[in-house]
Image (cartoon, grey):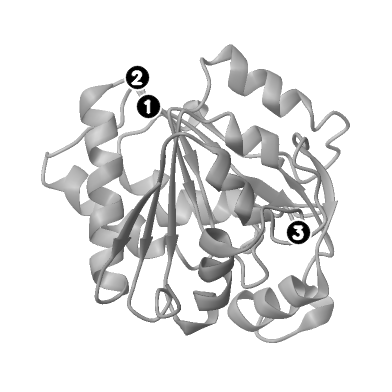
Amino acid sequence: MNIIKLANEVEVAKKAAEIIEEEVKQNRNAVLGLATGSSPILTYQNLIKAFKANEVSFSDVKTFNLDEYEGLQPTHPQSYRYFMNDQLFNHIDIKIENTYVPEGINNVRPESYDELIKENGGIDLQLLGLGVNGHVGFNEPGTSFESLTSEVDLAQETIEVNAKKFFNGDLSEVPTKAYSMGLKSIMNAKKILLIATGESKAEAINALLNATISEDWPCTILRNHKDVTIIVDSEAGKLI
């Protein structure tokens, strides 16, 4: 496990983007696993800058996102499909038909997402954020380490954080369920890149590295993966 501690979120995003760019440069047909939420926004901005500077092309890249809220149409401003289009896909040369996000509506076979990933050769590099309770994707504490893509219940803590960040503080607007890649789905990626910034993530980062590997802290499963890079800023890394 490679731990990189940097000064601030700007440096974290720059380094994360460099790693993703290098993956694509080494393999123009790379399959990337992508994340949403506030953590990767600056990373995506750096990727857009690199593309516009003709430093990297995503024309042959395929992407699979970790999760999607249940019940939200792709056009809903808070859906993760909308987020990805708005924050990244609309600004680079990726083919939109090569970008995959779990269906938020009428998702009758969520496990087929794993089958689709396998059909496309598996994920070469999976980008992750980290929840304050140690969740990755929407795999909340107690999620089985053997879990694949499925419908999941969101923890109250996650709902409250998302309400504050994305739903103007209105808890009633936040979906209580989502479709998420499972922990086994994530662990199937060839490489994993996790980014975390801010003091609120410090306890989870400390647990990831030092707590007993258990479903109480879902992120601890990453210690069983052979190729993980973790990038944190000074605040998120203050306990390690």
Measured in 3D between alpha carbons, the distance from the residue under mark 3 to the one under mark 2, in whole angstroms, is: 32 Å
* Residue located beneath label 1 in the image: 61
Left or right placement of residue 211 versus residue 160 in this view: left
Label 3 SS: loop
Q: Earlier in the sequence, mark 3 or mark 2?
A: 2
* Residue located beneath label 3 in the image: 140
Eyeballing the image, is 121 above or below 102?
above
Label 1 SS: loop
Residue 130 in sight: no
Q: Residue at x 68, y 70 (%)?
A: 133
Packing grade of label 2 (10 A; few <14, some 14-19, many >=20) is some
Camera-side residue of 4 and 32: 4
Residue type marked 2: Asn
Eyeballing the image, is 94 above or below 112?
below
Residue type marked 3: Glu
* Residue located beneath label 2 in the image: 29
Task: Evaluate if marks 2 and 1 touch, with contact meaning CB atoms under 8 Å apart.
Answer: yes
